[in-house]
């Protein structure tokens, strides 16, 4: 081996021993005749001292060292002189007096400094990801990812689950996104789809009698990216036979508790359970952040007989008038209030009513229209006090009111410091919740049809089955989500395991008999051979790790992620291919020429040039 110890592992107990270390030059300081190096490896930093009196040749070599040179050093571990002990470093009590050095490999000047404090453009970081990953924070994140995944495996192994791989080249599995397609050379004109999830295969494994399945698996969804999405991402995919909702909830909750215990050394409280309706009602979203209050309040009673026309007409149309209270922000400047109104409009609201609760009364453009009873009722129902700001959204469309207030709630909590700092050791920091009792369908007005909120294989709550054909809005699904601190962490459901029922649901989705046979015939056939009742869940590994590590973006916990435009600046993927390759696949491109292509590629090459 090219080392006897790892740099970051050396401690006072090693004083007096001769060690060989290999690593990267983190920093070099020349102190009048003595050179100090912080040598870095996966375990951390250690200080190396080159003194010409100890070894002139080593000292001279050390003079030529630059940041990120990869070197090997041999020397004696000694106590640091009085007054030079560094408490911030785990190796801070000692240093290594270099007797020999070998340069293993030189480095050009890196495009950015490898330290935690430099604020580097993300494009540049991703273009040189192998350097970016040398940073302590990134190494810590990837190590945490590994520990989380191995804790998950230990849990499921102990519970009698079998890890089984499912195909990557397969047929489309509808999870609501676009498919990534792979042309099939051996079957001209046809395509494999990369799995949006292993959904149908895991169900077939239950029909096959495997009973308890899990897989840490890559899935692919071609959709618009956000901070918590990547085109290829990792799921913990789980399926169980002979279970009901509570069984899946119980097993998944115990798994997450055991992961948090092992990795973060914290004992989680039992997860709250929120029916979907209640979650929308109180927080305007089905992934509520429960670390702060600022709940939505219904003002229908307060304004039941109002003279304020907009409010009266919304309520008359069966719409919603709801509010949230921002504590202590009643004095917000007009400009900031206007900005809030603009935000509300950009989220789809017709407008936003604001009320500053001041000692002399309400400060609000609508105040002159309110009656005394309404003013008193509003304070009573919202609990707003002097100095607070009340924001009201009214709309005939309930979903709009919830979306706008739900979003404002999150933005205002961030802005006014209601979101607690990352504090992994505090059980209260981790606000897990189960969201249950989802409607099965959601209306897609554009396409004039009903879409599944979960996926088409989700079970239907028995006493709502009758509405499948008559009023899909009343059908309740056997699905459940886990949310954590405002992120959706997992979705799952008890499945349909009966061919007739599955066909009925397809029909309700507008998928007729012929299309059912063509796309899902294999599943319907499998259900004819004694399919067991089954259900499962799929938590997102990238999201779990990001939250556990206190990162707000999943790219920080993925070794080689893509940008927001699904581009990889490191390898330049996706990239054009040769005419020959296309021809072999029976394909011809009708895409615009390189110069007309999307901006993502150009941004990538700009990053390369900048570097
Ligand atoms: N297949 C679902 C998904 O990927 C999860 C599940 O129902 O188990 O969202």
Image (spheres, rainbow, N blue to C red):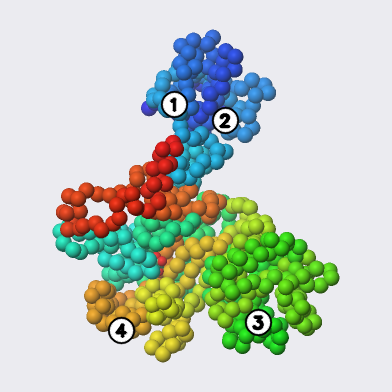
Q: Which residue is mark 1?
A: 69
Q: Is mark 3 within 8 Å of ligand 1?
A: no
Q: Secondary structure at mark 2?
A: loop
Sequence-first tag of 2 and 3:
2
Q: Secondary structure at mark 4?
A: helix
* Residue occupying image coordinates x 40% and y 25%: 106
Q: Which residue is mark 3?
A: 311
* Residue occupying image coordinates x 26% and y 78%: 515
Horizontal side of residue 578 vs 194, given as left or right:
left
How packed mark 4 is, by other alpha carbons closer than 10 Å (few <14, some 14-19, many 20 or more), is few
Compared with residue 472, is residue 362 higher up or lower down, i.e. above or below?
Answer: above
Q: Which residue is mark 2?
A: 91
Q: Is residue 15 visible?
A: no
Q: Residue 469's x, y, as percent?
A: 38, 88
The alpha-carbon separation of the residues under discs 2 and 3 comes to 66 Å
How packed mark 2 is, by other alpha carbons closer than 10 Å (few <14, some 14-19, many 20 or more), is many
* Residue farthest to the right, as pictured: 360
Q: Which residue is mark 4?
A: 500
Q: Nearer the viewer, mark 1 or mark 3?
A: 3
Compared with residue 433, is residue 449 higher up or lower down, i.e. above or below?
Answer: below
The alpha-carbon separation of the residues under discs 1 and 3 comes to 69 Å
Sequence-first tag of 1 and 2:
1
The alpha-carbon separation of the residues under discs 1 and 2 comes to 21 Å
């Amino acid at each position: 081996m090219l080392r006897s110890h790892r740099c970051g592992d050396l401690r006072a107990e090693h004083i007096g021993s001769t060690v060989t270390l290999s690593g990267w030059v983190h920093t070099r300081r020349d102190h009048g005749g003595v050179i100090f190096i912080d040598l870095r490896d996966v375990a951390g930093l250690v200080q190396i001292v080159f003194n010409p009196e100890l070894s002139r040749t080593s000292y001279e070599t050390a003079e030529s060292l630059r940041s990120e040179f990869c070197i090997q050093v041999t020397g004696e571990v000694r106590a640091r002189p009085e007054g030079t002990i560094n408490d911030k470093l785990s190796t801070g009590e000692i240093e290594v007096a270099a007797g020999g050095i070998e340069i293993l490999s030189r480095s050009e000047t890196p495009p950015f400094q490898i330290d935690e404090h430099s604020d580097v453009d993300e494009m540049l970081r991703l273009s040189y990801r192998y350097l970016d990953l040398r940073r302590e924070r990134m190494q810590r994140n990837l190590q945490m990812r590994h520990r989380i995944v191995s804790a998950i495996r230990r849990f499921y192994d102990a519970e009698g689950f079998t890890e089984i791989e499912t195909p990557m080249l397969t047929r489309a599995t509808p999870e609501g996104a676009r498919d990534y397609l792979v042309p099939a050379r051996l079957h001209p004109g046809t395509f494999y789809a990369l799995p949006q999830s292993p959904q149908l295969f895991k169900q077939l494994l239950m029909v096959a009698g495997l009973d308890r399945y899990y897989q840490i698996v890559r899935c692919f969804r071609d959709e618009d990216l956000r901070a918590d999405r990547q085109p290829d991402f990792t799921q913990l995919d789980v399926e169980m036979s002979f279970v009901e909702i509570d069984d899946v909830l119980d097993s998944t909750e115990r798994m997450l508790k055991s992961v948090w215990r092992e990795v973060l050394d914290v004992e989680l409280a039992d997860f709250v359970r929120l029916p979907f309706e209640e979650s929308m009602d109180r927080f305007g979203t089905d992934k509520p952040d429960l670390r702060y209050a600022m709940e939505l309040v219904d003002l229908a009673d307060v304004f039941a007989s109002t003279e304020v026309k907009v409010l009266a007409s919304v309520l008359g149309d069966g719409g919603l008038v709801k509010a949230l209270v921002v504590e202590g922000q009643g004095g917000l400047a007009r400009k900031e209030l206007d900005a809030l109104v603009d935000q509300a409009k950009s989220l789809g609201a017709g407008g936003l009513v604001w009320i500053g609760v001041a000692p002399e009364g309400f400060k609000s453009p609508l105040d002159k229209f309110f009656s005394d009873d309404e003013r008193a009722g509003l304070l009573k129902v919202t609990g707003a006090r002097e100095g607070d700001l009340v924001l009201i959204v009214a709309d005939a469309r309930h979903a709009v009111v919830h979306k706008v207030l739900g979003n404002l709630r999150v933005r205002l909590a961030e802005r006014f410091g209601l979101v607690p700092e990352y504090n992994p050791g505090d059980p209260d920091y981790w606000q897990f919740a189960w969201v249950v009792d989802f409607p099965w369908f959601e209306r897609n007005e554009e396409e004039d049809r009903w879409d599944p909120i979960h996926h088409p294989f989700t079970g239907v709550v028995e006493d709502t089955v009758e509405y499948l054909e008559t009023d899909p809005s009343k059908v309740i699904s056997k699905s459940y989500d886990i949310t954590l601190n405002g992120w959706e962490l997992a979705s799952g459901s008890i499945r349909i395991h009966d061919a007739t029922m599955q066909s009925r649901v397809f029909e309700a989705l507008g998928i007729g008999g012929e299309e059912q046979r063509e796309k899902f015939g294999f599943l319907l056939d499998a259900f004819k051979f004694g399919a067991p009742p089954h259900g499962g869940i799929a938590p997102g590994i990238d999201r779990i790790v990001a939250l556990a590590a206190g990162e707000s973006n999943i790219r920080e916990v993925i070794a080689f992620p893509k940008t927001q435009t699904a581009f990889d600046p490191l390898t330049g993927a996706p990239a054009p291919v040769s005419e020959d390759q296309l021809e072999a696949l029976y394909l011809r491109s009708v895409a615009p020429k390189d110069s007309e292509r999307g901006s993502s590629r150009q941004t990538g090459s700009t990053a390369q040039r900048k570097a």
